[in-house]
Amino acid sequence: MVAVAILAAGRGTRMKSDLPKVLHSLGGRSLVERVLHSCLEIDPIRQIVIVGYQGHLVKDALQSLPGLEFVEQTQQLGTGHAVQQLLPHLEDFTGDLLVLNGDVPLLRPQTLKLLLQTHQQHQNAATILTAQVANPQGYGRVFCNGENLLTQIVEDRDCTPAQKQNRRINAGVYCFNWPQLAKVLPQLQANNDQQEYYLTDTVNYLDPVMAVDVEDSQEILGINDRKQLASAYEILQERVKDTWMAAGVTLIDPASITIDDAVQLQPDVVIEPQTHLRGKTLIGSGSRIGPGSLIENSQIGENVTVLYSVVNDSIVGAGTRIGPYAHLRGHVTVGASCRVGNFVEMKNSKMGDRTNVAHLSYLGDATLGNRVNIGAGTITANYDGVNKHPTQIGDRTKTGSNSVLVAPLTLGADVTVAAGSVVTEDVPDDCLAIGRARQVVKPGWRLKSIPDANFPPSV
Ligand code: UD1
Ligand code: CA
């Protein structure tokens, strides 16, 4: 029986931020969310998040995750003090407690499984995740006897120069036999440089305590400042890109591309330079995205091209070409084999298959059928200053260049709108609509005030 506790009450002073450290975003998800995610495979019976500094913000941010309990640490007197807050909440609990710092976002689920297995196999009082690193600065140093049996953990700032030479560090991830930990927690003293109650001091009272080295020390990077946040992002990006390249995706100039880890890519996708894929995005097989594109929370079908464009919260059908310089602003559905071309902006609109809007247009709150052709410069005037209004455009309808479609408006199927029209009234199927002043041509007419070719006159 395993319960999980995440320490997320600290402010994270070294971030120099008003936002609690654990809510800082790493590749689209907060640090604490990532820590919780790494525990899922453990299948804990309880998941407790210890909150304190701006605790309501942390609670709000995690609201959508089911089954979390929150315990308040009103004063942040150290990691040991944080775990002391669990005592009244786990009175009857007799299992193991996995404790994780809320700022260790790169842990692999297998690593936690291994930690737990080792802990249970050896029936340890505590088992601590450790790593051997080239630069141990800032981390607590772990001292063991020959058999990985842990003798003490000394914080970096409390180390003697000789102790600082030890490169084995505490990852901030622990498995405790809870009844044994519960007995020793009240004994903690704050006699250290920070005058805090350190969770790491509990190992002085517990026996046996075992250290388990993580294979890939990048996993245990703790985020204390913005530089470490950037390093973590780099590590995460490398993992994500390696995974997709192994799965048959071409990345051209990977260093200039960023891909959130919730993104899904099918084989034979090509991602061109300076392209950023964010949120819950799916790109279908054979599609070529970029250069210079941003796709966020969108589904892109197969064999689509997106060139120098921005696509948010939208769906794009197979074989469609987007860009260059198109902006699908949100809630846009584009059918198959369409073209959304140069300097076209779409918002909250739908278009069927084989429909083109190729140049210089704005389509907002519009529904277009199949094989529609929107002429260059066509604009839906969807906003009257107070409310938004819809525009409907039937199959095979064509709008001439520079048409203004004043919503609410319905154009039927097979309608033609003459170039330069301002269309304010609905148009039935199979009609031509002309909404502009008729051109007048006056033969033999010349401007009277310009007498001759010597204009301007000399003085
Ligand atoms: C801690 C460990 C250190 C380890 C490192 C790994 C201690 C004393 N030290 O140091 O050995 O190498 O993590 O990254 O534990 N927190 C609370 N309440 C508090 C204080 C902190 O909830 O009163 C939370 C923070 O929000 C954070 C976590 O505990 O998520 C760790 O705190 P932090 O101050 O970052 O500890 P480190 O100095 O990094
Ligand atoms: Ca830390």
Image (spheres, rainbow, N blue to C red):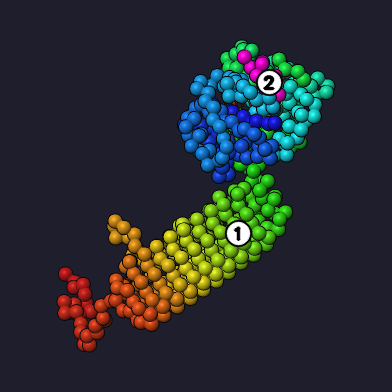
For badge 2, the amino acid type reads Pro
Give the mark toward the camera: 1 or 2. Answer: 2
Residue corresponding to mark 2:
179
Asked if residue 135 can be seen in this view, the reply is no
Residue 368: x and y in percent read 44, 70
Q: Which residue extends farthest front?
A: 92
- Find out whether residue 181 is within the magenta segment: yes
Residue neighbourhood size for the residue with mark 1, other residues' Cα within 10 Å, grouped as few (<14), some (14–19), many (≥20): many
Q: Is residue 2 above or below residue 360?
A: above
Q: Residue type at mark 1?
A: Ile
Q: Which mark is residue 343?
A: none
The kind of secondary structure element at disc 2 is helix
Residue 389 percent location from the top left of the image: 34, 62
Whole-angstrom CA distance, mark 1 to mark 2, is 50 Å
Residue 2 visible at all: yes
Relative to 170, is 373 on the left or the right?
A: left
**Residue count near mark 2 (Cα–Cα under 10 Å), binned few <14, some 14–19, many ≥20:** some
Q: Secondary structure at mark 1?
A: strand
> Image quadrant of residue 436?
bottom left
Q: Tell me where the magenta segment starts and ends, as one range.
A: 177-186
For marks 1 and 2, the one nearer the N-term is: 2
Q: 63 or 238: nearer the eye?
A: 63
User: In the rendered structure, does residue 165 fall within the stretch colored magenta?
Assistant: no
Residue drawn 37% across and 74% down?
A: 411
Residue at the (49%, 70%) spot, across then down: 352
Split into 4 quadrants, where in the image is the C terminus? bottom left
On the image, the x and y values in percent for residue 263 come to 60, 52
Tag 1–tag 2 contact (CB < 8 Å): no
Per the image, the residue denoted by label 1 is: 283
The part of the image, by quadrant, that contains residue 213 is top right
Q: Main secondary structure of the magenta part?
A: helix
